[in-house]
Amino acid sequence: MPALHQPTRRERQREATYDEIVRVAAELITQGAELSLRAVASRMGMTAPALYRYVANYQELVDLVAFELDKAATQDFMATAEKYPEDDPAARLAAACVAFRRWALTKPREFALVFANPIVTEESDRRELLTLSTSGHYFTDLLYEIWELYQFPYPSLDELDPIVRDAVLNPLIPAKAAHIEPADRGILWIYMRSWSALYGVVTLESTGHCDPRVIESGALFRATLLDWLEPLGLGAETERLTQLIDTELAQPPAAAAG
Amino acid sequence: MPALHQPTRRERQREATYDEIVRVAAELITQGAELSLRAVASRMGMTAPALYRYVANYQELVDLVAFELDKAATQDFMATAEKYPEDDPAARLAAACVAFRRWALTKPREFALVFANPIVTEESDRRELLTLSTSGHYFTDLLYEIWELYQFPYPSLDELDPIVRDAVLNPLIPAKAAHIEPADRGILWIYMRSWSALYGVVTLESTGHCDPRVIESGALFRATLLDWLEPLGLGAETERLTQLIDTELAQPPAAAAG
DNA sequence: CGTTAACGGTAAACGGTGTAAACTCCCCGC
DNA sequence: GCGGGGAGTTTACACCGTTTACCGTTAACG
């Protein structure tokens, strides 16, 4: 383990160009260009092989970019959610979900990179990055806040499949679970289930494996979201949340962030 | 429109090599190799540019392979389903769903190609092929048979979002809907919703964006499936279908088909 | 039957990709 | 002041999709 020392000039320089690489690479994607080592290097006034001083290979760059895009997207979700009061996590989650879908439909390339990119390597750094996924943390947090407020039902530890019990007690998947009491970890099961439902419709719509008219109407997404109000203890809030969702669905996608 | 004439020798030859191209390309994928025009051509003892006599470009070959793999996979689903009696569509659908998941987990590359491949071009032949998707037809058929037997509830036409109503009356998405009475087309809405749920878990698991232990346990998939028994009018069958699903989940994946 | 046009294939080439190896140069620590 | 390692370049390799020009064979037609 390296000693914690004051970063030298060279180290600062190194970190700076590293950040620039990731930034430039992410820009390429958001601008609709193809991501390639040569393109990134050329934009930085370097040659492609130089990038190998910073990145092990192409796939690693892709993973870094995916993490970066996820971070940026989460900022977007948060901005949408924060239109609603801090003490109204239900509204915030609903809004964030719609923002998530909007992002997936507006930027299908980014979405595919972040959420539909197969995690091939079993024991790679990839999994590490995935575990740190920003959006995952954000959604988990919102769900937990909802639970604090509405106390929706969740399975007890011994109701869970033993393997799942292990998984929620020592989670690998993006989830800031540290502050959740072990006995309450069944909440993470609800998280997985609801995330899976949300992920399903949004991926279906974003990749286009779905009737375009159904996408345009938003009906499938809307119905999926509404189905989850009851399980999350939000049955009494159905009316206002439906209205909120419809309002957000009607929002035009935000102008592309530079 | 060309007149229907007896295929000449040359035409037969052409069709044969066309089929061989698709077959060889699909083999490349199933054997874990990369799909490239050069690789396909070389395996056939040809050069790459020759393929352009049969295929407009690389993407078109990919689409053809995707359709081919989907067809092969459907054969697999059918084989699993046919372990159960013809007059028991509920059992058959449940088994087919498990087979679908098994396939997606065993062959994530194939799955990604067929189901997570973004449909980019708006008005391409891609959409045509998608509409003809074999697995889509199969699942729709099973669901319809279930409806015939159990008469599960479905929305009437005027309960549907107007855009969705258009979509189910004149479907673009894989569905042999011709034999479903227009008034009963709300069944297709149930189909879309349940397909979206199934697609969600399976994609999540197949791409690995999920705790590997949860995948291994199959709990998330199982729970998702069980949630759909009630809406499909299969509440009374819960016990035996649960047992069936668990049996199928315990089945080891079939040996890789040559 | 002979001519002509289309067809199915080749070779060569263009511009692009990721990546490996060898080599320079400059900064930093001793 | 000197040696070493780090950052970057050049060169090269093995691929990729795709275009162009060319050539024999095959089928159709006057």
Image (cartoon, coloured by chain):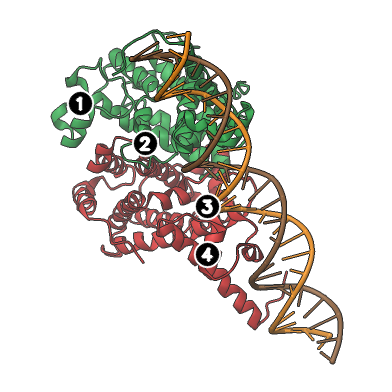
Chain colours: A red, B green, C orange, D brown
Work out whether residue A192 can be spotted: yes
- Using the rendered image, report if marks 1 and 4 lie on a common chain: no
Residue labelled with disc 4: A22
Report helix, strand or loop for mark 3: helix
In the image, residue B254 above or below residue A257: above
Label 2 vs label 3, nearer the camera: 2
Q: Secondary structure at mark 1?
A: helix
Q: Is residue A222 left or right of residue A23?
A: left
Nearest to N terminus: mark 3 or mark 4: 4
Residue located beneath label 3 in the image: A182
Quick check: A237 left or right of B85? left
Q: Name the front one of labels 3 and 4.
A: 4
- Residue at image location 22% in from the left, 23% down from the top: B185
Q: Is residue B102 above or below residue A75?
A: above
Tell me the CA gap for discs 2 and 3.
39 Å
Badge 1: chain ID: B
Instruction: From the top left corner, tell me how far across and down residue A18 is, in percent.
Output: 57, 69
Disc 4 and disc 2 in contact, CB within 8 angstroms? no
Label 4 SS: helix
Quick one: label 4 or label 2, which is nearer the N terminus? Answer: 4
Q: Tell me the CA gap for discs 3 and 4.
A: 37 Å
Question: Can you identify the residue that label 1 sits on?
Answer: B169
Callout 3 amino acid: Pro
Q: Are the residues under marks 3 and 1 on the same chain?
A: no
Tag 2–tag 1 contact (CB < 8 Å): no
Circle on res. A209 = 2
The amino acid marked with disc number 2 is His
The disc, 2 or 3, on the residue closer to the chain's N-terminal end is: 3
Kindly report the distance in space between the C-alpha atoms of the residues bearing marks 3 and 1.
50 Å
On the same chain: label 4 and label 2? yes
User: Circles 3 and 4: CB distance less than 8 Å?
Assistant: no
Going by the numbered disc 1, the residue's amino acid type is: Leu
